[in-house]
Amino acid sequence: MNPIAILTDPMAYGFMQRGLVAALLVGVVCAVMGTFVVLKGLAFIGDAVSHAAFPGLVIAYIIGAPLYIGGAVAAIATALAIGLVTRRSRLRFDTSVGVLFAGTFAFGVMMFSTIKGYVTDLLGYLLGNVLGIGVGDLIQVAILGAIVLVVVLAIRKELLFATFDPLGAAASGLPVTGLEYLLLALLGVTIVVSIQAVGIIMVVSMLVTPAATAQLLVIRFGRMMAVGVALAAVSAVLGLYLSYYLNLASGASIVLVETFFFGVALLLGPKTGLLSRGWRRATTAEA
Amino acid sequence: MDSIVDRISHRAESRRARGVAASALAGTAREPSVIVDDVTAGYGRRIALTDVSLTVAPGSLLAVIGPNGAGKSTLLKLIAGLIRPMSGRLSVLGGPPGSAARSIAYLPQAEAVDWEFPVTVREVVTMGRYARLGFGHSPGPRDREHVLAALELVGMADAVDRQIGALSGGQRRRVFLARAIAADPELYLLDEPVTGVDARTQEDLMDVLEAEAKAGKTVIATTHDLICAAQRFHQAALINGRLIAQGSADLVLDQGLLSETYGGHVLVLPGDGQRMVLDDAHHHDEAPGERHFHDERRP
């Protein structure tokens, strides 16, 4: 088999074409949002919001509404609720999130158990199936993803300032609280967009892993975002081909490729690279 | 010779610009930069400041002094509009706090910043321009000029492309002050600008702040360093949950006021009038040059 055929053969299938486009879209949007998720320490919130989307999906299924809308409403509402609870509650932040996280997911599972019969559609959302994505879904992913990208890029510098130094940004007149809620709402949208591709349980790694890998490699905000996007795109393509040829779950393959890159950066990266640090120590010791 | 009308319109124009010229022309007739009127404030149920009244004139170089937990940072945050008073009123640059935010540069304590953040020195200082730029506008050549000029002023022009976290504590403070300067503010609110920095940096930064005050800008800075406050600031406000005294910087040399501010933490050595103040500063980064004891001699 020639190398070009290795790349082109899978693309003969419509589901692989749609899957590739979806994986790329989701990877890119997640990596852009992930830059803020990593720098603001929102990973746990991301995990909570994705689990909270589940009851929304189930309820939408039961009442016959579009699943995306149900998931989006639940995810955004939870994201904003977390923002509010964090500001107002006297509990530790991760405690409040943990309570919301488990409670909302349990509610989803309970609603799910009231549905008679076996509902593959909904179970698919737990682990995701990017190869099962339809044209209609793909268009929704593209539109919502584009909205997130346009908004984030438009207010990129304000988000950067508010993330790096919230007090300084607020004192200079930036609406830091508003930006924070907007970021949480965008996070909710991103998660819902990604759920069909990689599933509720693995969305958080799409958000966190490429951006975290990028942070190990570069020292500039803009480059961190760019490197994260590039890593996410490469991982999406590689993961999808791996899943095709090795007959593996698609979402898990993408996530594992991303995780592999993270491991490589951790070992070899210029800043924190364990090996390069050891190497530097060895060379400076010689000098 | 200018006609009176000319001079008046001149003055109005300068006032609008709120620049160097304004203070020179309007002189002492300008209204105070900051008025704190009988303010009580805190967080949740904890009250940090009680019934504080304070007036700061334009061109002031004011040190806010007091032990940890005295409410120094709270006072700055109130003026910056970051927290609201529980009671009392504030006027900042002629309006309620927050109304003139673009003319305010706030410098957070070093501990409040994530130094692993992937930003370069240039990016940090450029943030000082963001509020002026407004949403959707990218920094232009004029902003870049401001950024470089500010970095030049604090002696960090050579480090523009370094990551902020790769700098020493003193260099980080220099860069943050450059960010404040790049914002071209009327009012500087600086939380511990010279804490944990070496003596040379402290002198350099105080030179810059002194020049800004001379140019008519108002500088309010919290500090732990009594020597620095006495020698380099023009005015001082001593606080410990309430305002103990406000006046010329010599106040910090007053034994009675110091005892009142620091409670039992002032040590008076008998004899030649030498004394030490144990300020209970406990900062996480033990940078070189940081002093926990301030040895102070009367001339």
Image (tube, rainbow, N blue to C red):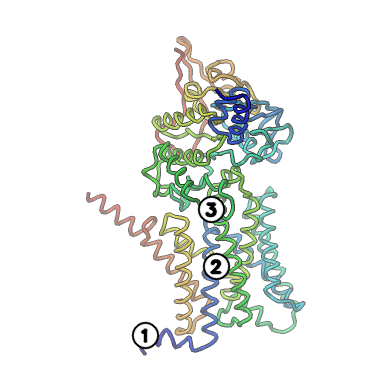
Chain bearing mark 3: A
Q: Alpha carbon of mark 1 to alpha carbon of mark 3: how far?
A: 42 Å
Q: Residue A3: which disc? A: 1
Does dot 3 land on a helix, a strand or a loop? helix
Instruction: Give the x, y percent position of residue A33.
Output: 55, 62
Label 2 vs 3, first from the N-terminus: 2
Instruction: Give the x, y percent position of residue B21.
Output: 54, 30
Instruction: Say which residue appears at 45% left-offset and 44% top-offset.
Output: B145
Residue B54 lies in quadrant = top right
As drawn, B288 above or below A109: above
As shown in the figure, which amino acid type bears the numbered disc 1?
Pro
Instruction: Say which residue appears at 67% left-offset and 33% top-offset.
Output: B94
Chain bearing mark 1: A
Q: Do the residues labelled 1 and 3 touch (CB within 8 Å)?
A: no
Asked whether residue B101 appears in the rendered view, the answer is yes
Chain bearing mark 2: A
- Residue of label 2: A29
Residues packed near mark 1 inside 10 Å, few (<14), some (14 to 19) or many (20 plus): few
Q: Residue A160: which disc? A: 3
